[in-house]
């Protein structure tokens, strides 16, 4: 695996020449060579099967009625992210009744679940220890229960708005880090940390590690949380897989280091926010962007997720 260098102590000085892509992305994105390739054939088959067999999709969603597993809001909502997702986790996986698991096994589910298990074994602790070096603190201490989510994404051309280029709106993941695997189709873009508003396309065959808000906080700002989005090319299907790793739910979101690189809000410095609460707050905006949640009356749709979170974390 390439060495990880997610840090934000680079200062890009003004220069006459335009910055190169690697300078713009310095410290934001790490490419890895995955030991196991995602089973994209099985993933495509699973999405196609669930779309063609609504009874199987309902049975799967009933295993986790709180939020569902197969999300297809984009079929009806042209303003939300134009994608379908299958959201799994060790907890959700354990809730799927044996009969449903058996009926979906040969439609791709088995291959998908074994890919996730292999990926966790191969990469999670290595990435955590690389991030710990940058953070100057042992992040594994807050990651004992492996709080993980596995997501399959289908940026399918057939949605409520087939012309939309919005595959996944700009956002920063909430957790410690995410590994994004892609099927070769471009679309993923990362915002240059030192040039806000500059979006850099990531090659479609790259596997990338991006850090999230929890890593930024726990590392006292030494690890940079990376904003990203997915642009859709109308008519082109894109599949991706994301493994999200977050701290344990009872971890207090406060810097683990004595000194910090950035100044945090009183709530963060006072250890008033735990991962469980933070995930809940972030998840709400997230599900709204993805079309899976209606906002209650009075909740302002215009506030973008990251702005709200920045206020909470940095206090301004
Ligand atoms: O599909 C991708 O490449 C990225 C998806 C993503 O960023 C997410 O689901 O949080
Ligand atoms: Fe993301």
Image (spheres, helix red, strand yellow):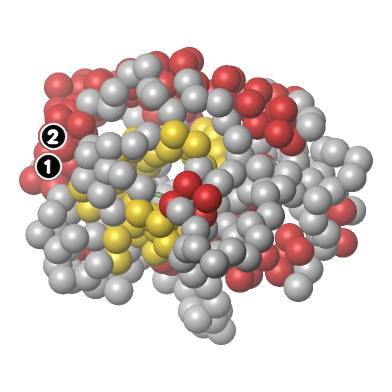
Regarding residue 80, the answer to whether it shows in the image is yes
Q: Residue at x 28, y 27 (%)?
A: 38
Q: Residue at x 61, y 40 (%)?
A: 6
Helix, strand or loop for disc 2: helix
Q: Which residue is drawn at 30% across and 74% down?
A: 79
Q: Which residue is drawn at 71% across and 69% down?
A: 311
List x then y, in percent, for residue 208: 43, 37
Q: Tag on residue 45?
A: 2
- Given residues 22 and 311, the one toward you in this image is 22
Image-quadrant location for residue 119: top left
Q: In which quarter of the image is the C terminus?
A: bottom right
Question: Dot 2 surroundings within 10 Å: few (below 14), some, or many (20 or more)?
Answer: some
Q: Tag on residue 48?
A: 1
Q: Could you tell whether 263 is left or right of 42 in the image?
A: right
Q: Is residue 19 above or below residue 94?
A: below
Residue found at the very far front of the displayed protein: 16
Residue found at the very far bottom of the displayed protein: 298
Q: Is residue 238 above or below residue 79?
A: above
- Given residues 239 and 193, the one toward you in this image is 193
Q: Are marks 1 and 2 in contact (CB under 8 Å)?
A: yes
């Amino acid at each position: 695996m390439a060495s990880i260098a997610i840090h934000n102590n680079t200062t890009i000085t003004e220069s006459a020449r335009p910055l190169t892509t690697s300078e713009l992305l310095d410290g934001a994105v790490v490419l890895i060579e995955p030991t196991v390739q995602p089973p994209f054939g099985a993933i495509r088959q699973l999405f196609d099967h669930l779309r063609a067999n609504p009874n199987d999709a309902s049975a799967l969603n009933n295993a986790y009625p709180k939020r569902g597993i197969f999300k297809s809001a984009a079929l009806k909502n042209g303003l939300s992210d134009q994608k379908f997702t299958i959201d799994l986790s060790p907890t959700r996986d354990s809730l799927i009744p044996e009969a449903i698991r058996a009926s979906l096994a040969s439609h791709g589910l088995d291959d998908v679940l074994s890919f996730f298990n292999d990926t966790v074994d191969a990469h999670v602790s290595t990435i955590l220890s690389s991030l710990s070096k940058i953070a100057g603190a042992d992040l594994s201490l807050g990651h004992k229960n492996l709080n993980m989510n596995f997501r399959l994404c289908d940026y399918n051309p057939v949605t409520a708005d087939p012309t939309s280029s919005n595959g996944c709106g700009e956002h920063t993941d909430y957790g410690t880090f995410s590994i994004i695997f892609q099927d070769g189709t471009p679309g993923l873009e990362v915002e240059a940390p030192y040039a806000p508003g500059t979006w850099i396309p990531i090659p479609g065959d790259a596997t990338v590690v991006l850090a999230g808000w929890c890593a930024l906080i726990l590392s006292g700002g030494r690890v940079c949380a990376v904003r990203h989005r997915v642009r859709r090319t109308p008519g082109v299907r894109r599949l991706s897989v994301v493994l999200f790793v977050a701290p344990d739910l009872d971890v207090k979101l406060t810097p683990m280091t004595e000194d910090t690189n950035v100044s945090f809000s009183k709530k963060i410095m006072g250890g008033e926010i735990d991962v469980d609460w933070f995930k809940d707050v972030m998840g709400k905006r997230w599900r709204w962007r993805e079309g899976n949640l209606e906002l209650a009356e009075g909740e302002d749709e215009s506030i973008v997720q990251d702005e709200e979170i920045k206020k909470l974390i940095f206090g301004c």
